[in-house]
Amino acid sequence: MTKGNHTMWKYEHTVETSAAPERIWALYADVNGWDAWDTSIEKIELHGPFEVGTEISMTPTGQDGVRFTIIELKENELFADETDLGDVKLHFIHTLLRIDGGTRVTHRVEITGPAAEQVGPHLGPAITSDLPDAMEALVKLAES
């Protein structure tokens, strides 16, 4: 799959929950509390309001810190962020779809850029391996 002239690596995981989108959105918006449902986070900080253009700094457990920027946001529906690593960009897209009896939650990761073909197959699985567990913890927290 290509995006523009660059190869893309992608991963997507979906779960369904009885919780309303607003409950999950509240957990997304509480960025400083993400470590309550994403155990791969050692430290996280939102630098401003939860809106497009605001930066977030995160230190995954046992790794160097990264900074990323919120690039798209529709309340109770979607937020996306971008990490610019030079030759590759990481996009995390979080989507909430209201369904009968709850919400369908989808987290998608895309790696694009000139080095995506080389970097994607290694970096992609490393950054997405804990995504299903984090999403299960997210919906459990939203349901409680």
Image (spheres, rainbow, N blue to C red):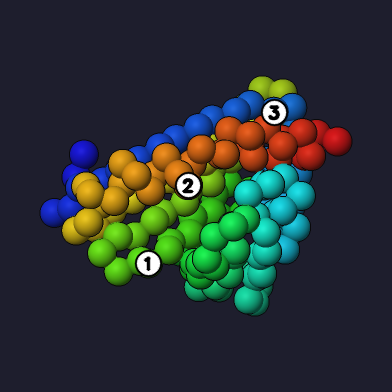
Q: CA distance from mark 2 to mark 3?
A: 23 Å
Judged from this view, the residue extending furthest toward the bottom is: 48
> Which amino acid is tagged 1?
Asp
42, above or below 142, in the image:
below
Q: Which image quarter: residue 54?
A: bottom right
Between disc 1 and disc 2, the foreground one is: 2
Q: CA distance from mark 1 to mark 3?
A: 32 Å
Whole-percent x, y for residue 127 in the image: 47, 47
Residue, disc 3: 17
- Label pair 1/3, CB-CB below 8 angstroms: no
Q: Residue at left 51%, top 70%? A: 67
Residue, disc 1: 84
Between disc 1 and disc 3, the foreground one is: 1
Judged from this view, the residue extending furthest toward the right is: 144
> Which amino acid is tagged 3?
Thr
Whether residue 8 sits left or right of residue 37 in the image: it is left
Whole-percent x, y for residue 78 in the image: 54, 49
Judged from this view, the residue extending furthest toward the top is: 100
Q: CA distance from mark 1 to mark 2?
A: 15 Å
Q: Earlier in the sequence, mark 1 or mark 2?
A: 1
SS state under label 3: strand
Instruction: Locate the C terminus and report the quarter of the image it occupies.
Output: top right
Q: Earlier in the sequence, mark 1 or mark 3?
A: 3
* Label annotation for residue 127: 2
- Mark 2 is surrounded, within 10 Å at the Cα level, by few (under 14), some (14 to 19) or many (20 or more) other residues, namely few
Look at the image and tell me whether residue 127 can be seen. Answer: yes
